Image (tube, rainbow, N blue to C red):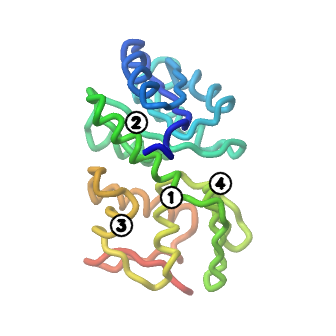
Amino acid sequence: MDTLKGHTILLVDDEQDILNFLSYNLKKEGYKVFTALNGEEAIKLVQQIHPSLILMDVMMPKMDGIEACQVIRKDLNITQPIIAFLTSRAEDYSQIAGFEAGADDYITKPVRPRLLISKVESLLRRLVRSSSSIVENPVISIKIDREKFMVEIKGQSMLLPKKEFELLELLASRPGKVYSREQILTIVWGNDTVVGERTIDVHIRKLREKLGDDYIRTIKGVGYTFSES
């Protein structure tokens, strides 16, 4: 998609040959690509280049991907990028740790060039779909800033990771409507992303920790809804 070209992508991996391979294929597609060898370098670059997307390995020296992701997500002074872990570790606990740290997705190594480009385009479409407007819902006193991924509830502002933000935005868009797990997976994660239902549970739990238990209700055997009260 031509509208996606020109986005800045940060690649983070401690193996230079992997960085070279990914960088070559992404630059060939018209993306601006920067590289870092560990989490510490990545954090410094994020503050300078403000990438749209970060593809980051998990296991790295000095600072691993999980810790780097946590630091980035807590930085209110940058426009939050999409973060996808690029790793050969496919265990459930590793993915859950990544999502809890604020990651948006996983890409498993080794990755073929065509699959890489497809995944990158899919991730960047999430940015293209997001507008810069602020959505207000007076019924539940919530403001959702799609550009900054900032949410304000009862006068309290908070920055959310992209997946938590998109999940909250979906539920809050129609208070009282029950969304099934299948609907949530399709709308928020997309058909081209393979995640388990436990991924939803992790994100719901993180939202409840931040918003309180009064907003998101579980409809047993069905799904989730945003409470109007």
- Of badges 3 and 1, the one in the foreground is 1
Q: At label 1, which amino acid type do we have?
A: Arg
Mark 2 falls on what kind of element?
Answer: strand
Residue visible at 63% across and 71% down in the picture: 135
Q: At label 2, which amino acid type do we have?
A: Phe
The crowding category of the residue bearing disc 1, from other C-alpha atoms within 10 Å (few below 14, some 14 to 19, many at least 20), is few
Looking at the rendering, which quadrant does residue 221 occupy? bottom left
Q: In front: 130, or 27? A: 27
Q: At label 3, which amino acid type do we have?
A: Ile
Q: Quadrant of the N terminus?
A: top left
* Residue 88 at least partly seen: no
Locate residue 81, reporting x and y percent.
56, 43
Residue visible at 38% across and 75% down in the picture: 224
Residue that badge 1 annotates: 129
State which tag comes first along the sequence, 3 or 1: 1
Q: CA distance from mark 1 to mark 2?
A: 22 Å
Q: CA distance from mark 2 to mark 4?
A: 21 Å
- Of badges 2 and 4, the one in the foreground is 4
Left or right of residue 77: residue 103:
left
Residue visible at 42% across and 12% down in the picture: 16
Q: CA distance from mark 4 to mark 3?
A: 22 Å
Residue that badge 2 annotates: 85
State which tag comes first along the sequence, 2 or 4: 2
Left or right of residue 14: residue 146:
right
Q: Which mark is residue 184?
A: 3
Residue visible at 28% across and 60% down in the picture: 197
Locate residue 63, reporting x and y percent.
52, 24
Looking at the rendering, which quadrant does residue 146 occupy? bottom right
Q: CA distance from mark 3 to mark 2?
A: 21 Å
The crowding category of the residue bearing disc 4, from other C-alpha atoms within 10 Å (few below 14, some 14 to 19, many at least 20), is some
* Residue 179 at least partly seen: yes
State which tag comes first along the sequence, 1 or 4: 1
